[in-house]
Amino acid sequence: MHRFFVPVTAFQSEVVEFPPECARQMAQVLRLTPGCKVIALDGSGSEAVVEITRLSARQANGVVLGWQKNEREPALHLTLGLALTQREKFEWTLQKVTEVGVSKIVPLVTRRSLVQLPSQVLEKYPRWQRILQEAAEQSGRGIVPVLDEPKILPDFIMQSRDFDFALIAWEGETQRLLQQAVPPSACQKRAGLLIGPEGGWEWEEVQQAGQAGWLPVSLGRRILRTETAAIVAAALLITLCEANQTGEDHDQSAD
């Protein structure tokens, strides 16, 4: 079934009034008709099975047939600090890290970022929000990742206390792989992950992050592009935690 994030106010008792943009997509792009069933998500992790009762290019209404909990959200709450890069690459990365399960994204201004003022990217936020929502719908998620306001790196790294563990991916780290730095009990915890810009981190930035509690980790022997590093690191972290959780659940059931 097709999936649509809608405002909480769209739910009126057992009736859903979809926003005009959803109606337009249903009628003109997906060619749905009254009687079709879709999933309406309220952004909290719950989702409703809805039967469309009225549909035009401007209006779509439906009746709720039942509610269910979304089961595809990672137990790990991962905040990704992502250095700003070229627009196309940054937007592609936003899409992909949403698909793999990142919970929050913070665009970062670093010493080697193409953008040097946080205010320069604020006008792009409506477009970026749409990218996140569409990626969350496509990948079956129950929430849309939070897109935080852009920050300069020194401000963001001081938030390490908000996380149970915080990692900075750095090509200069040769001893500690990312998977070796994940605590055994990382599931259902809050993690921070830093991904640098094209050209990499400057040594002073790595030092500052380390002093603030961020642990340098390697993503392997090869040097990855910013967008590749973000996807690989996020997917590794989330998958490791899901694998650990599956193992714990199996052990408990065996007992």
Image (tube, grey):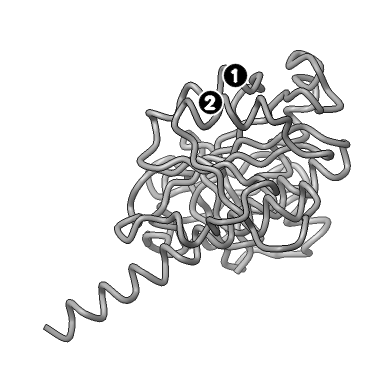
Q: Residue 171: horizontal and vertical position, in percent? A: 70, 49
Under circle 2, the secondary element is helix
Q: Is residue 249 above or below residue 223?
A: below
Foreground of the two, 244 or 31? 244
Q: Is residue 86 above or below residue 27?
A: above
For residue 132, side relative to residue 159 (left or right): right
Write down the quadrant of residue 250 in the picture: bottom left
Question: Marks 1 and 2, Cα distance to the nearest angstrom?
Answer: 6 Å
**Identity of the residue drawn at 75% across and 48% down:** 93
> Toward which corner of the image does residue 116 lie, by quadrant?
top right
Relative vertical location of residue 76 with respect to residue 236 in this rendering, above or below: above
- Callouts 1 and 2 close, C-beta under 8 Å: yes
* Residue 159: image location, x then y, percent: 46, 25
- Identity of the residue furthest to the left in this view: 255
Residue 27, position as x, y percentages in the image: 77, 56
Point 81% across, 28% down: residue: 113
Which quarter of the rendering shows the N terminus?
bottom right
* Amino acid type, residue under disc 1 in the picture: Pro
Few, some or many residues within 10 Å of mark 1 (<14, 14–19, 20+)? some
Circle 1 SS class? helix
Q: Nearer the viewer, residue 228 or 140?
A: 228
Q: Is residue 83 above or below residue 217?
A: above
For image coordinates 59% across by 19% down, the residue present is 154
Q: Amino acid at mark 2?
A: Ile
Identify the residue position indicated by label 2 in the image.
Answer: 157
* Residue beneath disc 1: 154
Task: Return the x and y of residue 14 as percentages of the image width and height.
Answer: 40, 50
